[in-house]
Image (tube, rainbow, N blue to C red):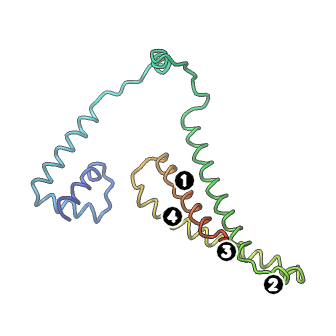
Amino acid sequence: MDCTEIKINLQALIDNILIKDELQSVKAHLKTCPACRSELNALRSVADGLAGLTLYEPSKDFNRTVFTRLGLEYQPSLFPGWLSWSVAGSLSLLLSWLAAIAVGLSLTAYAMKPYKVLFWLQHPGKTISDVQMALVKIGFAINDTVGFLANLLGFLLKGSSLPAQLAVASIVAFAIISITIRFLRPQPKYH
């Protein structure tokens, strides 16, 4: 690793979130590079200084006072913050799954050929097994996609907070669904 890569990883070293290979590379580099050691010492002194600061708990009327001084009406939240985040995260995940299911079902309907529909009308017993097989294939495809996205997002969001992870997951899900719908909808035919 060169000094630029090491400087990117110094805060992760202080936070103790480097994986074993990165940790060994950073420590090996720090043994030979006085500039990076100096940078690490500066970051550690800042972290130690911040850790020593006293955290003050605001009074119960803090928000009301701020709103009043700004000339605004204060309306306290009816729900605690963790509940709001939980509901928002649950709804975004639910909507992502529902959208994925809707895309899967629309792809199945779009891919059906007229002769297949006629075959199902003539042999209704075969319809159920074909639909079950299609749903199983869709389930595997969704599972593979979600697994890949989970690994990718886990790599990208290593060490970040849950609200940030939920926000990024929702944005990625929306982007994937939008792109999928755009490319898979029937295109108009011009004569």
Q: Residues within 10 Å of mark 1 (few under 14, many from 20)?
A: some
Q: Left of 164 or right of it: where is 26?
A: left
Give the structural element (helix, strand or loop) at label 2.
helix
Q: Label 2 vs label 3: CA separation? A: 25 Å
Residue 60 rendering spot, x and y as whole percentages: 49, 19
Q: Left of 99 or right of it: where is 117?
A: right
Q: Which residue is mark 1?
A: 170
Residues 184 and 97: in front is 184
Q: Left of 127 or right of it: where is 92?
A: left
Q: Which residue is mark 4?
A: 149
- Mark 3 or 1: in front is 3
Q: Label 3 vs label 1: CA separation? A: 36 Å
Residue 115, labelled with which disc? 2
Q: Disc 3 or 4, which lies upstream in sequence?
A: 4
Give the structural element (helix, strand or loop) at label 3.
loop
Residue 57 rendering spot, x and y as whole percentages: 41, 24
Q: Residues within 10 Å of mark 2 (few under 14, many from 20)?
A: few
Tell me the kind of residue under disc 3. Tyr
Give the structural element (helix, strand or loop) at label 4.
helix
Residue appearing at x 16%, y 49% in the figure? 39
Q: Which residue is mark 3?
A: 190
Residue 141 rendering spot, x and y as whole percentages: 61, 72
Are circles 2 and 3 on residues that touch, CB within 8 Å? no
Q: Disc 2 or 3, which lies upstream in sequence?
A: 2
Q: Label 1 vs label 4: CA separation? A: 11 Å
Tell me the kind of residue under disc 4. Leu
Residue appearing at x 31%, y 27% in the figure? 54
